[in-house]
Amino acid sequence: MKSIKEREKIFSAQEMAELLQEVIHQGASFRFRARGWSMTPFIQDGDILTITPCPNAKLKIGQMVAVLEREQNSLLVHRIVGKKGSNYLVKGDNLLSPDGLFSAAEILGVVAKIERGKRVLFPQGSIRPYLIACFSRHKGGMSLISWARRLGRVIKKGRKIGQEKR
């Protein structure tokens, strides 16, 4: 019997994009391991992402979406940070410049679930993704988010220490 490693298939970025397109076109969800740091800390290298089809009318600023990078025809999972006419401006949270404008037809699907170890994160349904998108559009915006995240950790740690003393 073959081990999992022997049966494992590694796809190139282009093959992954083609496979995702086919699965989403059939109306099914697509699950894969993220590679890279462009969406850190919200998506980390090695996280398992579930991409689901999304009707064009349901796309919103702040959503993380799968798109095809035009020059290399490879898969990107980045955030919608703006809208111009009927096109969406897409950018990685950890990048300085946007990827460009994409039509709704070019957006393959949305991130429905992020699995990190034993934690499962559902990115939709809160104002947080929208705020991240707004800050991400401006220089220094991600620095502000990073600072706020650190402040939140300090406050949370302070609360735990305060509760332990009681």
Image (tube, rainbow, N blue to C red):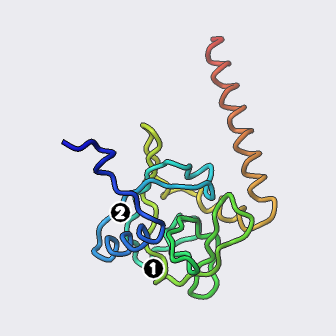
- Farthest residue, direction bottom: 85
Mark drawn on residue 57: 1
Residue wearing tag 2 = 30
Rendered residue at 62%/54% (across/down): 37
Foreground residue among 68 and 80: 68
Rendered residue at 72%/68% (across/down): 137
Mark 2 and mark 1 lie on one chain; the one further toward the N terminus is: 2
Foreground residue among 72 and 146: 72
Rendered residue at 48%/67% (across/down): 13
Mark drawn on residue 43: none
How far across and how far down the image is residue 27, in percent? 29, 72
Foreground residue among 68 and 91: 68
SS at mark 2?
strand
SS at mark 1?
helix
How far separated are the C-alphas under marks 2 and 1? 21 Å
How far across and how far down the image is residue 51, in percent? 41, 63
How far across and how far down the image is residue 140, in percent? 81, 59
When the figure is inspected, residue 97 is found, relative to residue 140, above or below; the finding is: below
How far across and how far down the image is residue 91, in percent? 64, 68
When the figure is inspected, residue 116 is found, relative to residue 8, above or below; the finding is: above
Number of residues whose C-alpha sits closer than 10 Å to that of mark 2, classed few (under 14), some (14–19) or many (20 or more):
some
C-beta proximity under 8 Å, tags 2 and 1: no
Amino acid type at mark 2? Phe
Amino acid type at mark 1? Ala
- Farthest residue, direction right: 140
Name the image quarter holding residue 98.
Answer: bottom right
When the figure is inspected, residue 50 is found, relative to residue 55, above or below; the finding is: above
Number of residues whose C-alpha sits closer than 10 Å to that of mark 1, classed few (under 14), some (14–19) or many (20 or more):
few
| Image quadrant where one finds the C terminus | top right
